[in-house]
Image (cartoon, grey):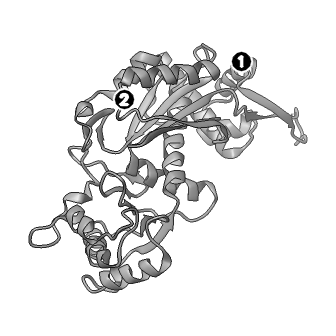
């Protein structure tokens, strides 16, 4: 392993995280297999696995056939050992999911919108969830705005939350590691990780576009990594100038028909210009749309209009996906990464 931390405590967490991640990816492994995969000595791997098995973090799944020596024990990670809490903050309500280390949903529900009520009331409701599921070891929260290291820096229509240190508040209030992410960044990450988890080829670079309740936004992944920008404002496509006196959000607002949740026919040009802009600047493999905002016929029209602004061979694939599912997958991915990398054996059971 490279760039190992200097202190024993930091080193312990890095090794633990590597073992957890490998077991969850591989399904099961022996000490020898983990030692070879991670480049960590066999005795060190054995020491950690023994401690993890004692704490109930590992499941013994059998003994391998002998290859001439002692038969090796095979272990799998206990997915119920730690749980995560993912929370989506939206205009109308708050949606939460409790999940295990394999992403299986243990509980989910809706709460009043934390964006419109006092944050202390939201915290009291989270306390109820944590009391019901004491093995929750991380929180991942998605918000419809720009986030700089856990601080909300831009979220239209919610002035009282501007510059609010949400990550610091959550970690102080609940004594749990927390991550706060922009909704579209989480959706892009979730779409990418879901395809990878299913064994399907995942676009290396993509732009995920949502017209949304709070105005349009986008999540951008380049080489599988979220692009946040120098001031963490990446993806705020509503500000992109498109016409003489209209930006993308204004053009989209004018183009929508009576059904405000779907893109009207006259919005094809505005979206086509946006696709051409993305192709010229980022040149992504794919642009993902929410399946409740477009259909195949509309995507065909958008593609044709985009080709009028940029050579067709440079256009990305236009695809649809389920936004809420991708959003949740992204938050779970972030929460799981936080759990396996920050929780130590001696901390896991409180």
Q: Residue at x 34, y 34 (%)?
A: 116
Q: Is residue 134 visible?
A: no
Residue 102 image offset from top left, x and y in percent: 66, 41
Camera-nearest residue between 80 and 160: 160
Q: Nearer the viewer, mark 1 or mark 2?
A: 2
**In the displayed structure image, the side of residue 225 where residue 109 appears, left or right:** right
Q: Residue at x 17, y 64 (%)?
A: 247
Circle nearer the N terminus (1, 2): 1
* C-alpha gap between disc 1 and disc 2: 40 Å
**In the displayed structure image, the side of residue 208 where residue 87 appears, left or right:** right
**In the displayed structure image, the side of residue 150 where residue 32 appears, left or right:** right
Residue 127 image offset from top left, x and y in percent: 52, 19
Q: Which mark is residue 55?
A: 1
Picture quadrant of residue 35? top right
Q: Residue furthest left?
A: 244
Q: What element does badge 1 sit on?
A: helix
Picture quadrant of residue 209? bottom left
Q: Which mark is residue 334?
A: none
Residue at mark 2: 117
Camera-nearest residue between 91 and 53: 91
**Dot 2: within a 10 Å radius of its alpha carbon, few (fewer than 14), some, or many (20 or more) residues?**
few
Q: What element does badge 2 sit on?
A: loop
């Amino acid at each position: 392993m490279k760039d190992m931390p200097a202190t024993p405590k930091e080193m312990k967490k890095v090794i633990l995280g590597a073992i957890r991640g490998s077991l969850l990816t591989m399904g099961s492994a022996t000490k020898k297999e983990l030692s070879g995969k991670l480049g960590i000595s066999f005795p060190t791997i054995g020491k950690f696995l023994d401690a993890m098995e004692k704490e109930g973090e590992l499941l013994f799944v059998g003994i391998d056939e002998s290859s001439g020596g002692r038969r090796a024990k095979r272990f799998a990670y206990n997915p119920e050992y730690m749980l995560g809490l993912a929370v989506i903050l939206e205009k109308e309500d708050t949606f939460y999911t409790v999940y295990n280390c394999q992403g299986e949903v243990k509980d989910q529900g809706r709460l009043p919108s934390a964006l419109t009520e006092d944050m202390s009331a939201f915290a009291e409701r989270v306390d109820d969830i944590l009391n019901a599921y004491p093995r929750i070891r991380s929180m991942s929260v998605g918000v419809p705005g720009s986030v700089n290291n856990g601080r909300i820096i831009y979220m239209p229509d919610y002035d009282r939350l501007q510059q609010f240190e949400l990550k610091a508040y959550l970690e102080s209030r609940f004594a749990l590691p927390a991550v706060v992410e922009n909704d579209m960044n989480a959706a892009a990450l979730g779409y990418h990780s879901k395809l990878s988890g299913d064994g399907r080829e995942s676009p290396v670079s993509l732009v995920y576009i949502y017209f949304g309740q709070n105005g349009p936004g986008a999540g951008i992944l380049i080489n599988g990594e979220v692009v946040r920008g120098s001031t963490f404002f990446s993806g705020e496509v509503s500000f992109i100038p498109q016409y003489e006196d209209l930006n993308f959000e204004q053009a989209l607002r004018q183009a929508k028909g009576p059904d405000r949740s779907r893109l009207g026919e006259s919005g094809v040009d505005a979206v086509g210009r946006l696709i051409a802009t993305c192709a010229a600047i980022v040149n992504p493999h794919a642009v993902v749309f929410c399946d409740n905002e477009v259909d195949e016929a509309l995507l065909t029209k958008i593609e044709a209009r985009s080709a009028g602004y940029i050579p067709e061979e440079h256009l990305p694939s236009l695809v649809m996906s389920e936004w809420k599912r991708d959003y949740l997958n992204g938050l779970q991915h972030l929460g799981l990464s936080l759990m396996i990398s920050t929780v130590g054996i001696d901390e896991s059971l409180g």
